[in-house]
Image: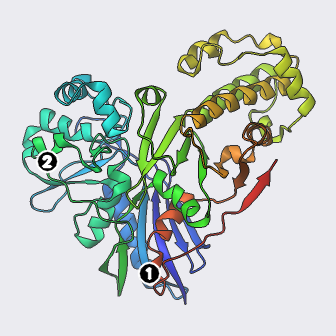
Amino acid sequence: MKKVIAVFDIGKTNKKLLLFDENFQIAFQHEQKFPVTKDDDGVECDDIDLITSWMKKELEKLTESKEFYPVAVNFSTYGASLVFIGKDGKRLTPVYNYMKKVSSSIADNLFNQYGGKNEFLRKAASPALGVMLNSGIQILWLKKEKPEIYKKTGTILHFPQYLSYYLTGKLVSEPTSIGCHTFMWDYDNMCYNKWLVDNNIKLPEPITNDIVFDSKIGNKTIKVGIGIHDSSASLVPYLSGSKKPFILVSTGTWCINMNPYNKEPLTADQLSQDCLCFMSPKREQVKSSRLFMGHFHEVWADKLAEHFGVKKDNFKTAKYDRALIQKMKKKFPGYVFFQHGKESFDEGLKSADLSLFKSYEESYTQLIIELTGLCIHSINLVIPENDSTKYIYISGGFARNEIYVRLMAKYFSKQKIYTSEIDNSSALGAALVISQTFSGKKEVTPNLGLKAWR
């Protein structure tokens, strides 16, 4: 039988089970969608009972497989989601939707008590994202709005650690979840934020992501990882596979630019431009910036297709045309689609004059020129003055957009630009951090599927 590590990769829309063999190639993959449920306030959220029940059943089936021998399991999930555990060890709450609205007064009171908004955000290395995306706010919200539930709370886990706890009964924390726009981590002192101590909120001390626990599942004893936040997990294959400093440009609905080698603290100006810090499995800061690039592209590409009477996916066949790019840059030295800035996206969507373009090709090329410009600005926010970056890796959907990649390669001429064909990088990262479960292997260099551009 083939030895495998199982990874449950839990996204907001799709939930996946992937099996990785000893070469960290995908041996099996299954995708599942679940209906959402509603929390105790009637707000839609993931049905955690359905997810954990599915997870357990899949693992039990795997232990009976004649094709695969599961040596370990780990979890990669979206962040900004907490699970409150009662003193009796049972879950007290739903997994609240991180887009759930909360009163801004909760965060404002926190800022006022701890040095003012700018200083608090700087130390926490996160912008104020509103709603529940700063997951520490969920704790203060529950304490204020649902005190009877809060009084029963014994400990609090992030989503990946709850899935691990479900199988092992071990209450743990780890750096990638606790260090990601939570307001719960003090990046100056690399410890839990003081407000948690002052509010008598006791959380498990973070342990490293390579730790595993034994758990009896079906007829086998399996090593169970402690889980990892998906954004940090997606960085792991590049940390394992690259020998020189790099920036990862992870594109999708959000473009997240991660620089693990920039040790400078975030500035107030960077925070105001949607920069933040993630934390690596080795408990080191990963200076990052964000751009809603995939969303901007989707909305504008649909509008351009409708205006010019072409199919919505027509952009997939768009080619890099140097002469056309030079023509567009000469014709439009400024921006057409984002003339009011990315912050005024909706306004630009209404006011942009599409009659300026003679064809879909002209308009789409101009769109990518502008999106690339916004992306370059976002990347530059995480590049220090004394930069040592040798490589820029581009992953995700835009890695297949030739216009975007060639424009990036031209601008970042001092670095080597690579596109990466890794699929399921978060799941792969979750498998790699517990790679020692395969006969004690600790150093694994995954195949990044790289293509060089110039």
Give the residue at x 45% y 42%.
264
Q: Neighbour class for label 2 at 10 Å: few (<14), some, many (≥20)?
A: some
Could you tell me residue 77's position as x and y percent? 42, 55
Image position of 300 (left or right of 454): left
Question: Residue under circle 1?
Answer: 437
For residue 409, above or below residue 238: above
Residue drawn at 71 percent across, 29 percent down: 301
Q: Position of residue 405 (x, y in %)?
A: 75, 42
For residue 251, say whether it is visible.
Answer: yes
The answer to which image quadrant residue 154 occupies is: bottom left
User: Camera-side residue: 233 or 443?
Assistant: 443
Q: Residue 164 in the image: x percent, y percent?
A: 32, 66
Report whether residue 100 is seen: no
Residue 201, labelled with which disc? 2
Q: Residues within 10 Å of mark 1 (few under 14, many from 20)?
A: many
Q: Residue at x 30, y 43 (%)?
A: 96
Q: Amino acid at mark 2?
A: Ile
- Mark 2 and mark 1 lie on one chain; the one further toward the N terminus is 2
For mark 1, give the secondary structure.
Answer: helix
Q: Amino acid at mark 1?
A: Thr
Indicate whether 58 appears above or below 276.
below
